[in-house]
Image (tube, rainbow, N blue to C red):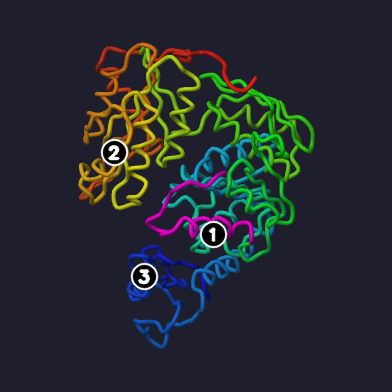
Amino acid sequence: MIRQIACDSRKVQHGALFFALRGAKENGQAFIQDAIGRGAVAVAGEGPLAAAPSSKIATVQVREERKALAIAAANFFDHPANALQLVAVTGTNGKTTTTSLIDAIIKASKSGTGLFGTLAYETPAGKYPAPNTTPESVDLQGFLAEIREAGGKYAVLEASSHSLTMDRLWGCHFAAAVFTNLTREHMDYHKTFEDYFAAKQTLFTGTGAGVPDTAIINIDAEYGKQLVGLSKKTVTYGLNASADITTKKFQLTFSGLSFSAQTPKGKVQITSSLVGRINVYNILAAIGAAQALGLSNEIIEAGVRNLESVSGRFQRVHMGQPFLVIVDYAHTDDALENLIRTARELNPKGRIITLFGCGGSKDRTKRPVMGEVTGRLSDLTILSSDNPRSEDPLKIISDIIVGVQKTSGKYVIEPDREKAIGLAMDEARAGDIVLLAGKGHENYQVLADRTLEFDDQEMARRALLHRGYSGAREGVGPGETPSGPR
């Protein structure tokens, strides 16, 4: 009798069926004996199993091991996805905020739900760390079972390109699928931009259980236009007048935003504490997904209003200083540009000081592009470290400088991120905005030989405290002037 499905030998318990998956760096077949030693009674994988188990161990040879894992997990948990309405959000930027908005709207309807993404995995049974943006299929099916058993009706998740390529969502049918945008990211994994888009497109052509009931597509995004018509129904959103869900004008301040959204199901009056033009898009997407689930406009308005912030997304650090400090997860060129433009739009008179770095052992091609963005749009760029991993931080910074030097932008180098944050505070004057970009909600720094505790928000507070600012103040900082189309 199979008592567990597992694909990590370290998690194997007695009675497990162990899937020996081939990974980018390691082959799961190397861990078959470890899994058996921990209690596995059956092993599955593609091709002949390298370490032939004893005759007491059942073996299963499959054609597509990741799809087989997803199917086996769904069978094991008695197909929990069939009892829920699933919503997936894919795209390069905006996934975390959009899923958080949809989750808040569902909770406003008093319905049980789950939320899975970069920040954490949450079900009615508890909150779990998120090692990946999208859970492995066997973990996801277990989480969906928790929602079902608690009487929940919904689940909302971020669908990363990796997860779609690795069939983690195989066999799941989606009531709604959202596309936010597509910009350069993960080129170390996908190799070409078209391969990256093809992975995202998979969500709309079907993940083994039919195409989504409704696709909610950002029609202002060039690649979004290629996804129209792939699902049973398409609803478009954007600031383009031709979009199904749009707004003609909005007000942006450091305190939040407000607008009236025109939708096929009537007007939705939005008041949100989220900041910036990019969140107008995220809210429009969430409206589309919520309406696809059949939720009322009144519930949508309440849910959006209830979401006060999203961890590491345009989060303010207040210690009484006369300038604004913002922590944001922006770690792609498009996200970084949106962040800086948001700051500039809200505060056109003050200087923008942007601190960022790029991850080591990851896509090198985006480094000079990000450097060019900050050099072009910021008044000062401070180049530092962001999870350098096994790479020399100065070599990563050298790659970024290539882009900065294409502009006339000023920059300084400080590879020690804590010192760099202090430098940013020293450089800031009254009315300026300091942007600490790249790490957002993360509370660690990954080095070659160890992982350190490191939180941009906490480091910013320490730096401000050290400079004589000792109390948070209510208020919005410089440039409290509504902006946006009139």
Please give the name of the residue rendered at 44% of the width and 72% of the height, measured from the top-left corner: 18
Given residues 414 and 212, the one toward you in this image is 414
Seen as rendered, the residue at the extreme bottom is: 55
| Location of the C terminus (image quadrant) | top right
Q: Residue at x 56, y 22 (%)?
A: 256
- In magenta, the rendered stretch is 180-205
Which residue is denoted by mark 1 in the rendering?
198
Q: Hey, what amino acid is under mark 2?
A: Glu
Residue 189 part of the magenta-drawn span: yes
**Observer-nearest residue: 151 or 49?**
49
The residue to which callout 3 is attached is 38
Q: Is residue 326 above or below residue 14?
A: above
- Crowding around mark 3 (Cα neighbors within 10 Å: few <14, some 14 to 19, many 20+) is some
Residue type, numbered disc 1: Ala
| Earlier residue among tags 1 and 2 | 1
Provide the secondary structure element on which disc 3 rests. loop
Query: Where residue 148 sits in the image (x, y, percent)?
Result: 64, 53
Q: Identify the image quadrant of residue 261.
A: top right
The residue tagged with tag 1: helix, strand or loop? helix
Residue 113 horizontal/vertical position (percent): 62, 45
Circle 1 Cα neighbour tier, 10 Å, few/some/many (<14 / 14–19 / ≥20): some
Spatial separation of the CA atoms under disc 1 and disc 3: 39 Å
Using the rendered image of the protein, determine whether residue 107 is visible from the camera's viewpoint. no
Which quadrant of the figure has residue 478?
A: top left
Please name the residue that numbered disc 2 is placed on: 453
Asked whether disc 2 touches disc 3, contact meaning CB atoms under 8 Å apart, the reply is no
Which residue is pictured at 63% across the width and 27% down the height?
305
Q: Position of residue 264 (x, y in %)?
A: 78, 38
